[in-house]
Amino acid sequence: MFTTFMKQHSFSEYDFTTPMFPTVEDRSFWEAFQNEDCVKLAEDALDYGWPTIKATDFMEFKKSGNRVIMEDIHFDRRNHLVLFALAELKENQGRFLPQLVNGIFAICEETYWGLSAHWPNTPYEYGNIHRVDEPYIDLFAAETAEHLAVIATLLRKPLTEYCPEILDRVEYELERRIKAPYLAHRDWRWMGYHKRPNNWLPWILSNVLSVFLLTEKNERRLHRSLEKMFVEIQHYYDALPDDGGCDEGPNYYGRAGSALFEFVYQLKQATGGKLNMFGDEKLARIASYLKRVHIAADYFVNVADAHAKGSASEMPMLFGFARETQQDELMNFSAAVFAERTSEFRISHTWRTVRLLIYNSEFLREIEDYPVTYPIHCAVEVLPDMELAVIREGDWVLSAKGGHNQESHNHNDVGSFTLYDSTTPVLIDVGINTYTRFTFDNETRYTVIPWTRGRNHNQPMVNGEEQRYGEIFRSDRFAAHAGKIEISFAGAYPVEAGVESLTRELTLSEGGMRCTDRFAFTDDQNRSVTEVLMSALPVRIENGAAILGESYRVFAEGCAVATEFLPFEDAHLESDWKSKGVTRLTFSVEGVESITLSVEKLK
């Protein structure tokens, strides 16, 4: 897509000087901006002291694995910077300019704009603390640069009148930290020249693009930067499956597929609509991912490190993506989900780039007035390349995945499934706890972190063995039809499991779900199977069956059932599942060739 464009066009054909964002002088936009609280919040924060990130805060990640100590201060500073900028844009009276300048100055004084966990991709390559003479662009160095570039552009006139030197400082820091290093490097892992890229690439480049489009005065250098970005964004585009799926899960979509949208949308804006790449069919499929993995309300199929809730906040941006790719059904879907959550939606200054806030405001005005029609789901959704399926029957929603065990943000979860009764999670994929150093070290990811392991997903353990990490551990076959999902996944287990074939048939009806696993073993003397199911509902055992939340009965004929409560000890997971932990249900049996698990709703 992107490299093909460069073969057919030259950037010199386009004028990239069309204003991309409404400046403070555009009073109609900012007076209508949908955050009435930002001025009051900024007033309350006028004595904010811009706390310092100490060297020991930065070192804590290497010392203990804790990344929050440094990150809390980092993000608090940037959240306040954006807050003061929004308040000034909204009010336009100069009251917040002193604190805005303080914030810009404080952030420009930081040695490094990124996170300790990202230096430069591991905490050990450059020692204990960051070096001022070797700038590195991580996710949040790029976001910081976007903050400063966009704020300096939108508030250029009042900042020039109040403190013109601060604009010079922004220009200097953007050049030495972002623009020059970006053009000089092709060795950073996220760029995709030597390693399969993940969400880092579009997330970073959507922000680096803003910096160059808004601040680069040399046309030849701008074109050179665009050429490099197009090569790199093509790396990401090629890494995505043709079905448009996001193997990092729905929570990462806002920093993955949606960041790709922001990249392409900026090009269209900056050229007055002339550089328009939204006719690409794969781009349209990337846009539709959230629709295809939606369960109900704010629940989405949470593979990998994703959380089950939270992606409904992406609906205004998804609406814009759908609009640009001309997908009426996707616009309708995003508007319908947004309508259910509209009372909870706020354009918040936290964890957002200024560009994203502006886009949310733009699309929000359209999505609120969109005439929604129902239904918004299909009975069957299949992502054949990613090997993920969602099927529906009445209020039941069943999802299952195949794939392999070296996907981005991987969990050892081939063949696993989730089951919902409308908005009630019956059988779940736990997700991931708060990130630490141990989360991304493969020596500890599948030992210290319990939720990534096969033994804590809805899949069998065979002869005491769980699935292993690696691309060779994968499904052999994946198919989905109305009311049925079929997966063959003996290949996801090590040779020690002694399993020659393993086929799973998941069926869904108004009465509930059945999961039938059929096994062929390499040794007739070793045929032990323990089926694992995970539930955040209260569980009790009654007459050899498990009763979940007093509403669902789970049973398997001939199996010994047992339970183990695993505490989350993590605020995010407790919030996701409204529980202090999860119950690990096991159904164990010896010497059989098939097991059928059944889930039914109690009257």
Image (tube, helix red, strand yellow):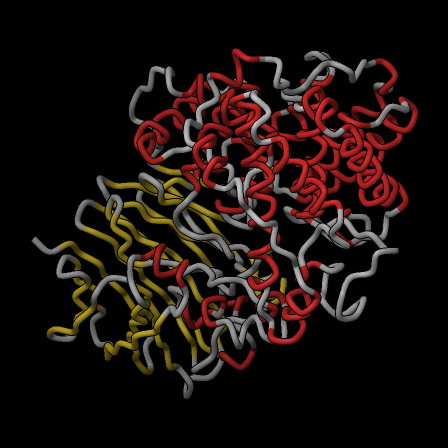
- Give x and y (percent) for residue 218: 90, 24
Q: In the orientation shown, which residue stands out farthest toward the left? A: 603
Is residue 236 visible in this depiction of the protein? no
Residue 122 vertical position relative to residue 328 in the rendered view, above or below: below
- Give x and y (percent) for residue 93: 56, 21
Quarter occupied by residue 206: top right
Quarter occupied by residue 352: top right
Q: Nearer the viewer, residue 406 or 498?
A: 406
Is residue 277 visible in this depiction of the protein? yes
Residue 588 vertical position relative to residue 74 in the rendered view, above or below: below
Q: In the figure, is residue 350 to the left or right of 172?
A: left
Quarter occupied by residue 461: bottom left
Residue 517 vertical position relative to residue 181 in the rendered view, above or below: below
**Residue at the location (56% across, 25% down)?**
358
Q: In the figure, is residue 599 to the left or right of 19?
A: left
Q: In the figure, is residue 42 to the left or right of 154?
A: left
**Residue at the location (87% across, 23% down)?**
217
**Residue at the location (68% across, 36% down)?**
101
Q: Nearer the viewer, residue 535 or 137?
A: 137
Residue 454 vertical position relative to residue 148 in the rendered view, above or below: below
* Quadrant occupied by the N terminus: top right
**Residue at the location (47% across, 68% down)?**
501
- Give x and y (percent) for residue 336: 34, 27
Count of marks, rendered view? 0
- Give x and y (percent) for residue 365: 44, 18
Q: Nearer the viewer, residue 176 or 578?
A: 176
Q: Nearer the viewer, residue 304 or 100?
A: 100
